[in-house]
Amino acid sequence: MKPGKTGFARIIDATRYSWYGIKAAFQHEAAFRQELFLAIVGTALACVLAENPIEFLLLVLPLLLLLAVELLNSAIEAVVDRIGEEHHELSGRAKDMGSAAVFTASGIALTSWAVILFGDWLW
């Protein structure tokens, strides 16, 4: 068995493959494009709205988490669709759980933004 690349060469390859994944998600997944737009706008707003670095992180990190979870959900959907188009309970369950993960990450982002922006009114 031939050993894989190590060190800096491995990091370069991993970065390239990550870029391919982001590019594929952008080209093929409308939800990813929408969430990427939300993350870009949200990051710009966070630059203006955050009163300190911690608030900035609490606004931006949940948006990045949402993107990461959407990428994982898209990967799950791609693998399930690759296996077969026929309906199967486990395939449906896998897709539903991926969707639930995106929903949960959306809730985390929404909660974080609500607490930072409206926390004085909520407490």
Image (cartoon, rainbow, N blue to C red):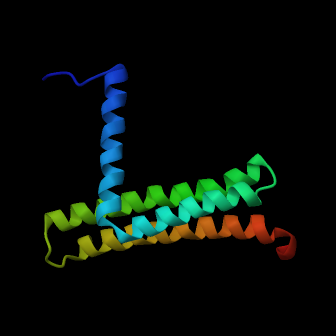
Placement of 70 over or under 15, stated as above or below: below
In the image: residue 82, left or right of residue 46: left
Between 18 and 122, the one nearer to me in the picture: 18
Question: Which quadrant of the structure image shows residue 68?
Answer: bottom left
Q: Quadrant of the C terminus?
A: bottom right
Question: Which quadrant of the structure image shows residue 16?
Answer: top left
Q: Position of residue 49 (x, y in %)?
A: 76, 61
**Residue at (38, 67) in percent of width and height:** 98
**Residue at (67, 62) in percent of width and height:** 45
Placement of 53 over or under 1, stated as above or below: below
In the image: residue 113, left or right of residue 7: right
**Residue at (33, 59) in percent of width and height:** 25
Q: Position of residue 77 (x, y in %)?
A: 28, 66
**Residue at (62, 57) in percent of width and height:** 43
Q: Residue furthest bottom?
A: 87
Question: Which quadrant of the structure image shows residue 91?
Answer: bottom left
In the image: residue 13, left or right of residue 123: left
Q: Quadrant of the N terminus?
A: top left
